[in-house]
Image: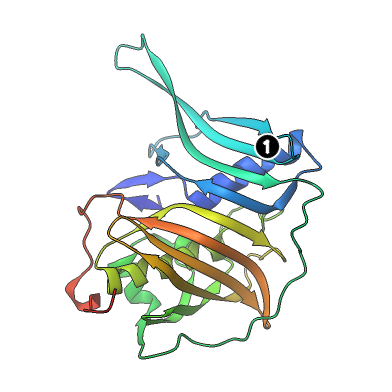
Amino acid sequence: MDHHLEGKAILPAVESLIIMARAVRTYYPRAEISILKRASFPRFLTIAPDAVRLPVMVDLEMSGEGSVTASLLTSVKSKTGAISRTVEHARVEFAAADSAEPLTPPFLAVNKPEGNYISVPAATIYHELVPFGAAYQNISGDLSVSPKGAWAFIRGGDYGADESLLGSPFPMDAAMHAACVWGQRFAGKVCFPVGFEKRVIYQKTKKGKEYIGHVAPVSVSKEMLIFDAWIYKDDLICESISGIQMKDVTRGRLCPPEWIRVNSEW
């Protein structure tokens, strides 16, 4: 219940990636799970408060180039139980084992966003802007937000999560919180991730550790906000995520508070 929207607990996108990576590693152990491409999260997977187990399916398909596409699915029955249909909640492509993508961490200078920026305390973010519970409150200190991006210290989390495959899910989740705050300030809407173009994991993040998260807007429109993001430690990138797609999935039911909104070039 710490990860919820409009009163319903939902499976975090970062957790769905771990579930799919686990299936790929089991059946295609040579796949390069550190390089994820063309991810989409078309439909939330809600979790009932009394749920102990949730039946899901992971469909795997290998391409001719050696990459593996995974889809996280559930089966939904009609009210009468006579008809069932399959619903896709997440999809991602894992690179081929001999992918030419470099996995050497590049250097990135640690700089706050350029231009005039405001500092938003983490306590305010998680009380008014991204009101998740304690497990998903992993922006620490202040988030610096300017028209050119957002920057903050982020934590690897302290709660139960599988960090053996893709690293801790909490830093990437916190980076998307930063993008959400940017969208509320400069686009005037509350947006959630619906996909990304590419994620490269150079060094797995760990629970209990602190990192720096930086997000930068790439494209802004009425339909979609697109960001690039980097998670790094000691000037070396741990993860880069390009083409993060953020969308107002509530169709205006959630609105930013007036104090965070600002008129801007966007």
What is the secondary structure assignment of the residue under circle 1?
A: helix
**What is the x, y in percent for residue 141?**
45, 82
- Quadrant location of residue 87? top left
Q: Residue at x 23, y 66 (%)?
A: 256
Residue extending farthest to the top is 82
- In depth, the one of 94 and 159 nearer the eye is 94
Q: Quadrant of residue 59?
A: top right
In the rendered image, the vertical position of residue 89 relative to residue 169, given as above or below: above
Amino acid type for the residue under numbered disc 1: Ala
Q: Nearer the viewer, residue 238 or 113?
A: 113
Note whether 40 is above or below 196 in the view shown: above
Task: Residue at 56%, 58% (x, y): give it.
Answer: 159
Between 163 and 61, the residue placed more toward the observer is 61
Specify the quadrant of the image occupied by residue 170: bottom right
Report the front residue among 75 and 90: 90
Q: How is the image coloured?
A: rainbow
Placement of 238 over or under 45, stated as above or below: below
Q: Extreme bottom residue here?
A: 116
Is residue 162 visible from the viewing direction of this image? no
Q: Position of residue 44 (x, y in %)?
A: 40, 42
Q: In this image, 132 relative to 37: left or right? A: left
| Residue situated furthest left in the rendering | 258
Residue at position x 61%, y 66% from top? 240
Q: Position of residue 163 (x, y in %)?
A: 67, 56
* Residue 246 visible in the snapshot: yes
Q: Is residue 222 left or right of residue 173?
A: left
For the point 21% across and 61% down, the residue is: 255
Q: Is residue 77 above or below residue 215?
A: above
Q: Quadrant of the C terminus?
A: bottom left
| Disc 1 crowd, CA 10 A, few/some/many (<14, 14-19, 20+) | some
Would residue 103 be found to the left or right of residue 143 on screen?
right
Disc 1 designates what residue? 23
